Image (cartoon, grey):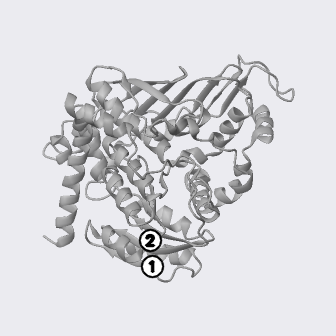
Amino acid sequence: MSKLKDSRRDFIKGIGILGAGAAVGCISINKEEKEKNITRMSTRPKGAQYMGDFSAPSLETVRCAFIGVGSRGSGHASQFAQIDGVEIVAICDLYEDLAIKSRNECKEKGAGRHQNIALYHGDQNLWKKMLKEVRPDAVFIATPWGLHAPMLITAMEEGAHAFAEVPIATTIEDMYKIVDVSEKTQKHCMMMENVNYGREELLYLNMCRQGVIGDLLHGEAAYIHDLRYHMEEQERGAGSWRTYHNANRNGNLYPTHGLGPVAQYMNLARTEDNFSRLVSFSSPAIGRKKYASKYYGKDHKWNKLDFKGGDINTSIIKTNLGRTIMVQWDETSPRPYSRLNLIQGTKGTLAGFPTRVALLEDIKRVTNDHHGWLDEEQLQVIYEKYEHPLYKRLGTLASAMGGHGGKDFIMRYRIIECLRNGTPLDQNLYEGCFWSAVAPLTETSVAQNGMPQEFPDFTRGDWKKTKPLKIIS
């Protein structure tokens, strides 16, 4: 067996263990360990500094490196290569062909600006060597979920700002480790929640900030996306490792796409309110087993898995102010894609899939009443009046660049803009942890038959000092 195959085998084995550990570890802590963790987690280590509104020194040129350039990571590298003020300095992937392909795309899309891109491939630990040798300003991580935490932590310890795909980590313990290292090193650590940069999400954020729907009461967030086809990816690709999470864990494994925007509408973990507790229930686990039985032989590895994760998980979050958020996750059922994206206030409701608006008060004499959704012509008036200024500035370019309707490009552009200007990022370290914490908390609640679970306070009380996210021009 070749070195790459050995590395790949160990890699998949490790990911499977990480997936199982995420579920088991969060419900098997004894009382003494729990009390010790509470003490440590409530106390900021000496010399650490709160990162809520953190601004790093500005960088004229942001030297960027990438770990993991499969379908998601290669998109990051390709688009960052086209943004002014970026130099692509290194690419790391387990597979040589992916690393070379990504390097070539960066050179092509960067119009000759990125000629000295160091490549690292063929071993699962070469990313550590890359960080030491290249010393990038920013590292972008698009690897299996269980690897996000160690890679983020090491990147910051090596002097880089660290960015990862969702989730930021899979366990509460790892989230606190990330917080401690970021606060100690004074390096940005951002979970790249691209959905917050969608046109509808930016529109609704602007409307909420302007008080159009009054006092906010309730939100609904989801990730409903039939991804059973991922099981075809058995040697490489998301299905080769994500399937083990579906088998070993039972809860909401992917909460942030729906929850991120709703949390920012409500201004959670910023000044006025924060996550308090949740309850969670999962349906029976049927769909994945049936799918494996139908499409794979009885001796296939997928048919040897005991799929424990319920087909759909439904959770209710309660905030400090008593507001509620329903969060759902379903990557198995045959139904259309949706993130729900609903925010309800005392003067109206905004919802997604499709875009819908109902308002108590008239806006420019176009609304009927709140008993019906606005029609297409009326929605255009709403867009004209409340379109987010960031989308006005970047929307046309973002649509041309592509990437989930342009939201990927806006997110990437804003990261570089903030690093070059020395301004706070749009999503801070703690938001990534709060949104990601839903996964392990739901696993524990489901395992305890829906018992309430308290959110840890990753800010150690300082969320009250964090300014609301500005409506960026």
Task: Indicate whether 384 appears above or below 7.
Answer: above
The percent position of residue 92, horizontal first and vertical second, equals 36, 70
How busy is the neighbourhood of tag 2: few (under 14 within 10 Å), some, or many (20 plus)? many
In the structure shown, which secondary structural element does the residue marked by tag 2 occupy? Answer: helix
Which residue is depicted at the point 30% across and 67% down? 94
The amino acid pointed to by label 2 is: Ser
Name the quadrant of the N terminus.
bottom left
How busy is the neighbourhood of tag 1: few (under 14 within 10 Å), some, or many (20 plus)? some
Name the residue tied to disc 2: 102
Calculate the distance from the C-alpha at mark 1 to the C-alpha at mark 2. Answer: 10 Å
- Viewer-side residue, 74 vs 182: 182
The amino acid pointed to by label 1 is: Ile
The percent position of residue 286, horizontal first and vertical second, equals 27, 29
Which residue is depicted at the point 43% across and 48% down? 166
Which residue is depicted at the point 71% across and 24% down? 214
In the structure shown, which secondary structural element does the residue marked by tag 1 occupy? Answer: loop
- Viewer-side residue, 280 vs 38: 38
Task: Indicate whether 290 appears above or below 279.
Answer: below
In front: mark 1 or mark 2? 1
Residue 29 in view (yes/no): no
Left or right placement of residue 356 versus residue 277 in this view: right
The percent position of residue 181, horizontal first and vertical second, equals 39, 54
Residue 378 in view (yes/no): yes
* Image-quadrant location for residue 65: bottom left
Which residue is depicted at the point 65% across and 40% down? 200
Left or right placement of residue 306 versus residue 330 in this view: left
The percent position of residue 462, horizontal first and vertical second, equals 51, 38
Give the number of callouts.
Answer: 2
Name the residue tied to disc 1: 117
* Image-quadrant location for residue 28: top left
Ranked by sequence position, the earlier of labels 1 and 2 is: 2
